[in-house]
Amino acid sequence: MLKVSGLNQYYGESHTLWDLDMDVPEGACTCLMGRNGVGKTTLLKAVMGLLPVKSGEMDFGGVDLRKVSAEKRAGLGIGYVPQGRQIFSLMTVEENLQIGLPARGDGMKKIPDYIFDLFPVLKEMMQRRGGDLSGGQQQQLAIGRALVTDPKLLILDEPTEGIQPNVVQEIGDIIRKLNQEIGLTVLLVEQKLPFARRVADRFCILDRGRNVSSGDIGELSDELVREYLTV
């Protein structure tokens, strides 16, 4: 579904992504892994058009993403939950969710009911301001807002960061349901190895802006963990 080939990206004079290749197969849950500062978030922002790239290709279902402006990529079917959630704290839960509706291709003007089936707490707090929610509730709101766009690919940047353990479990269950039962393709960045092993079926490890290993999650060996993931 998403194929990145030979991608190079710079921050000023700093070369951050080096001839990077990555595949996210349709129907898979792929976990992007690596220590802090290796280029994971940079790659996601490049896919979303939030950072310019110097060279390389990004193909999404046959569409060259480099030719599509950032504001139109959601309309192609890419839902994005950024690191830190970035909800609108002064807007209500309902207003945060409604923001995703214009990106839908079917013209729906109503928040889909299945969002509240996945996140019942959001229905209870529709008129609460986003900033008044707990961290875990805000993360659920951020995921719900992305799902409102009716994505084919859901990208999540560290969805468990700063979240209490019981909500981490719920978010893991929801990702598995979206991927395995609904068939949504998922790409997530995740630092917690047990969580990654539970929800993902593929992995891709970045180190210094390069893809150094990828494959089925069952192939993620202790040796790879020690070399590239252990702090």
Image (tube, helix red, strand yellow):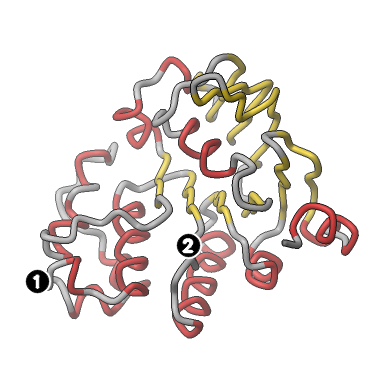
Front one among 149 and 168: 168
On residue 34, the disc is: none
Query: As displayed, is residue 73 above or below residue 110?
Result: above
Under mark 1, the amino acid is Gln
Give how far across and how far down residue 141 sits, in percent: 29, 64
Would you name the residue on which mark 2 appears? Answer: 159
Residue at 66%, 64% in the rendered image: 196
- Would residue 6 appear left or right of 175 to someone viewing this image? right
Q: Residues within 10 Å of mark 1 (few under 14, many from 20)?
A: few
- Would residue 143 appear left or right of 191 to someone viewing this image? left
Mark 2, secondary structure of its residue = loop
Front one among 160 and 65: 160
Give how far across and how far down residue 55 sits, in percent: 59, 14
Would you name the residue on which mark 1 appears? Answer: 127
Give how far across and how far down residue 111 sits, in percent: 21, 58
Instruction: Residue 143: name its quadrant.
Output: bottom left
Residue at 43%, 28% in the rendered image: 51
> Which comes before the other along the chain, label 1 or label 2?
1
Query: As displayed, is residue 150 above or below residue 209?
Result: below
Residue at 81%, 60% in the rendered image: 225
Query: As displayed, is residue 132 above or below residue 32?
Result: below
Q: Quadrant of the N terminus?
A: top right
Residue at 63%, 67% in the rendered image: 192
- Would residue 213 appear left or right of 6 to someone viewing this image? right
Give how far across and how far down residue 187 sits, in percent: 56, 49
Residue at the limit of the structure toward the right, as seen here = 223
Residue at the limit of the structure toward the front, as seen here = 13
- Would residue 26 appear left or right of 112 to someone viewing this image? right
